[in-house]
Amino acid sequence: MKILHIGREENMERYPAPDYIAEEIETVSLPMGKRPEDYLDAMEEAQVIVADAMADVPGALIRKMPHLKMIHSEGVAYNRIDLKTAKEREIYVCNCRGMNASAVAEQTVFLMQGMLKNVLLNDRGVREGRQIQIKEGYMVRGDLKELSDCKAGLIGLGDIGKSTAALLAAYHTETYYYKRHPLSKEEEKQYKVTYLPLEKLLETCDIISLHLPVTEETQRMCDKNFFGKMKEGAYFVNTSRGELVDDQALINALKAGKLSMAALDTLSHEPVQKDHILLRQPEEIRNKLLFSPHIGGITASSFRRGYAMIWENVERILRGEKPMNVVNEK
């Protein structure tokens, strides 16, 4: 079997195929951002494409690969793969569902804590020799919060959302969720969550956290109307995708004091450059933004779990079987 890998060659080297199928596969790796013609020249006859979750796999490439049977995201996201063309050609598109659930959940709770404890300004203050002034300020105002003081609202409750809910339960956080199809009462009890309609969730919760894929329906869903419905002084977390957020609407909510802070592991238009609108704000707004470089789901353990899924699906294709985690069946 021939595999075209679009992404970092080191991934294939670090997480190689198990010995029992290694002799049956041939792999060519090319970086992201190449033209379809470049990938075709490298391995037009490939039966499988393994693609970085941020890599484009366009119809122009898919249509010209006559032996292609499966396109597999290296991660959970698959919004850059032309699902329609793949379905038309009866090619499976698969993802590594659940591979990074615990890792992203940890990052989510870390960012929540980072905002509540305002690690950005506190770290800077200690480095500037203002440790005691900052400490006394909190004691005078009495406004330093714990997660148990907050109501958290999770928008989306897939694998990552459920893992986040489980962590929040350990902090004794009152947790609510919204999704199109609510969980059963038994599952709600298991994850210690309560369903609320979206508008009620925004009005009720002190912290709102996104756990959604990017679709036509969810793109830029966090707009002026969304932030306007949030609780005054609430906190906002995005560890999903930057494309879910209207950046200008977020800035306006921070300026107006509607939001106390926003913590973002991902921004629109990645890789993020210095001229990104969220990075060009005055100090007052910059102090209300806590960033991390989209690292929530890229732990070593996440990749080990993900590549175990990829190689199992490659083995299934070799055996003529249907792979797991197919995302383009509907």
Image (spheres, helix red, strand yellow):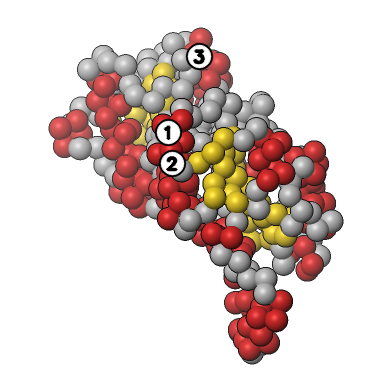
Q: Is residue 16 left or right of residue 30?
A: left
Which label lies toward us, 1 or 3?
1
Q: Secondary structure at mark 2?
A: helix
Asked if disc 2 and disc 3 are in contact, CB closer than 8 Å, the reply is no
**Residue type (three-letter) at the residue carrying disc 2:** Tyr
Q: Is residue 33 left or right of residue 98?
A: right
| Up/down of 115 relative to 208, above or below | below
Seen at 80% across and 44% down, the residue is 228
From this viewpoint, is residue 267 visible?
Answer: no
Q: 289 and 110: which one is in front? A: 110
- Marks 1 and 3, Cα distance to the nearest angstrom? 25 Å
Q: Which residue is mark 2?
A: 191
From this viewpoint, is residue 263 visible?
Answer: yes
Residue 132 coordinates in the image, percent (x, y): 63, 89
Residue farthest to the left, as pictured: 20
Asked if disc 1 and disc 3 are in contact, CB closer than 8 Å, the reply is no
Q: Residues within 10 Å of mark 2 (few under 14, many from 20)?
A: some
Seen at 56% across and 64% down, the residue is 146
Residue 174 coordinates in the image, percent (x, y): 54, 50
Of callouts 2 and 3, which one flags the residue occurring earlier in the amino acid sequence?
2
| Up/down of 16 relative to 284, above or below | above
Q: Which residue is mark 3?
A: 330
Which label lies toward us, 2 or 3?
2
Q: 167 and 219: which one is in front? A: 167
**Residue type (three-letter) at the residue carrying disc 1:** Glu
**Residue type (three-letter) at the residue carrying disc 3:** Lys
Q: Residues within 10 Å of mark 1 (few under 14, many from 20)?
A: few
Report the quarter where the N terminus lies. Answer: top left
Residue 32 coordinates in the image, percent (x, y): 51, 39
Seen at 69% across and 59% down, the residue is 261
Q: Which residue is mark 1?
A: 187
Q: Which label number is shown at residue 24? A: none
